[in-house]
Image (spheres, helix red, strand yellow):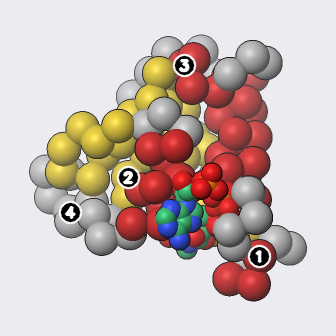
Amino acid sequence: MLGLGQVRFRKQTYGHLARIIVSPHHRGQGLGRALCVALMRAAVRLHPITAFSLYVFPDNTNAIGLYRALGYVEKGMHPKFNCVLMEAPLTAVGPL
Ligand SMILES: CC(C)(COP(=O)(O)OP(=O)(O)OC[C@H]1O[C@@H](n2cnc3c(N)ncnc32)[C@H](O)[C@@H]1OP(=O)(O)O)[C@@H](O)C(=O)NCCC(=O)NCCS
């Protein structure tokens, strides 16, 4: 296994990515991007979503770099936990 990730239907609106991880020995080769895009495409197939969301720790610069490159933007801190909400429009997934 080279990586793992989950997507769920959040707030009847979002395809929400979670637990994204790529094997430490295989990072920087585009696998994180491919994994996220595959999960986003799965979310579009599985649920009537209108956008994407995820949470990320504010000091996780690698992950934030990946999510920004995919079209996610920061929407502010979680009200209780030390993590940033990021959202992307449906168009971020590209042509299906
Ligand atoms: C975040 C993570 C999944 C990225 O996986 P990856 O396979 O290395 O990412 P990719 O090779 O697909 O890189 C995609 C983009 O992410 C960004 N990125 C990835 N590594 C980066 C780094 N070290 N510094 C800055 N940006 C980085 C870049 O924008 C990159 O695009 P580019 O290749 O065109 O420059 C991986 O670092 C990881 O598993 N981290 C530990 C678990 C984790 O923090 N998960 C996120 C929880 S919210």
> Which residue is located at x 57 percent, y 17 percent?
91
Quadrant for the C terminus, please: top right
Tag 4: Cα neighbours inside 10 Å, few (<14), some, or many (≥20)? few
Eye-nearest disc, 3 or 4: 3
Compared across the picture, whether 59 is left or right of 17 comes to left
- Type of residue at label 1? His
SS under mark 4: loop
Query: Is there a contact, CB below 8 Å, between mark 3 and mark 2?
Result: no
Relative to 24, say whether 87 is above or below.
Answer: above
The residue where tag 2 is placed is: 55
The residue where tag 3 is placed is: 90
Relative to 35, say whether 53 is above or below.
Answer: above
Outermost residue toward the right?
A: 1
> Which residue is located at x 50 percent, y 15 percent?
50
Q: Quadrant of ligand 1?
A: bottom right
SS under mark 1: helix
Question: What separation in Å lies between label 3 and label 1 (alpha carbons)?
Answer: 28 Å
Eye-nearest disc, 3 or 1: 1
The residue where tag 1 is placed is: 26
Question: What separation in Å lies between label 4 and label 1 (alpha carbons)?
Answer: 29 Å
Question: What separation in Å lies between label 4 and label 2 (alpha carbons)?
Answer: 10 Å
Compared across the picture, whether 73 is left or right of 31 comes to left
